[in-house]
Image (cartoon, rainbow, N blue to C red):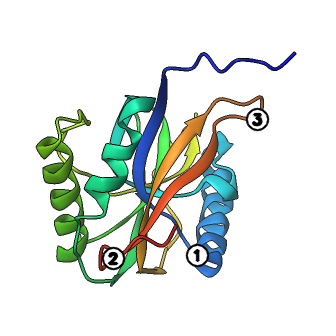
């Protein structure tokens, strides 16, 4: 007997997804942080920089998400992740750029505007671009190792998060070049 899918919504977000070299450098940074902070490292295959967190999206609205993303037109850009840190309140250690590239701010702004135009809810808190490298860490001295990760952003993705025994599993649902052309 075939199992019927009763799921009515999916947990989703837009993100920058690192290429192999960037992912490797971020994994090395997570290893260094883990040595001084402990905690649980983010799995290499799930490293990303969230652009817009959507939360639970009705499955019937995924087409609207794909259409909205296709209207975003921002050029490709490069950024350097040079800052490591730790948020005491949620025990997350992260990497972020010292300065936010204008294109990154524009990308987030355009995504939010397109989502609002089709009535899709999203987390509208002030944007703080970061890559979560580990969770449940404790960095008492906050003496972080140096970081210099170059990230060439050429595309952004729509990701669906699915719970799994190993933690969240991520499925890329849509992919767009930073010129707004759908790649998948």
- Mark 1 residue crowding within 10 angstroms, few (<14) / some (14–19) / many (20+): few
Distance of mark 1 from mark 2, alpha carbons? 15 Å
Q: Is residue 66 above or below residue 165?
A: below
Among numbered discs 2 and 3, the one appearing first in the sequence: 3
| Element carrying mark 2 | loop
Sequence-first disc among 1 and 3: 1
Residue tagged 3: 166
Counting other residues with Cα less than 10 Å from the Cα at mark 3, is it few (<14), some (14-19), or many (20 or more)? few
Q: Is residue 122 above or below residue 65?
A: above
| Residue 101 visible, this angle | no
Q: Which mark is residue 19?
A: 1
Q: Secondary structure at mark 1?
A: loop
Q: Quadrant of the N terminus?
A: top right
Q: Crowding near pointer 2: few (<14 within 10 Å), some, many (20+)? A: many
What is the C-alpha distance between the residues marked 1 and 3? Answer: 22 Å
Residue labelled with disc 2: 178
Alpha-carbon span between mark 2 and mark 3: 31 Å
Question: Horizontal and vertical percent for residue 50?
Answer: 39, 52
Nearer to us: label 1 or label 2: 2
Residue displayed at 68% across by 34% down: 167
């Amino acid at each position: 007997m075939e199992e019927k899918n009763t799921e009515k919504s999916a947990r989703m977000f837009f993100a920058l997804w690192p290429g192999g070299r960037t992912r490797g450098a971020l994994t090395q940074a997570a290893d260094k942080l883990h040595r001084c902070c402990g905690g649980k490292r983010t799995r290499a295959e799930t490293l990303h920089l969230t652009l817009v967190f959507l939360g639970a999206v009705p499955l019937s609205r995924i087409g609207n998400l794909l259409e909205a993303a296709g209207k975003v037109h921002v050029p490709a850009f490069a950024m350097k992740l040079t800052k490591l840190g730790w948020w005491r309140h949620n025990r997350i250690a992260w990497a972020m750029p010292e300065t936010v590239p204008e294109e990154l701010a524009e990308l987030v702004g355009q995504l939010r505007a397109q989502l609002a135009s089709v009535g899709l809810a999203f987390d509208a808190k002030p944007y703080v671009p970061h890559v979560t490298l580990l969770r449940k860490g404790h960095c008492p001295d906050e003496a972080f190792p140096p970081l210099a990760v170059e990230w060439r952003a050429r595309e952004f993705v729509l990701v669906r998060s699915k719970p799994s025994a190993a933690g969240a599993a991520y499925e890329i649902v849509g992919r767009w070049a930073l010129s707004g052309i759908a790649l998948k």
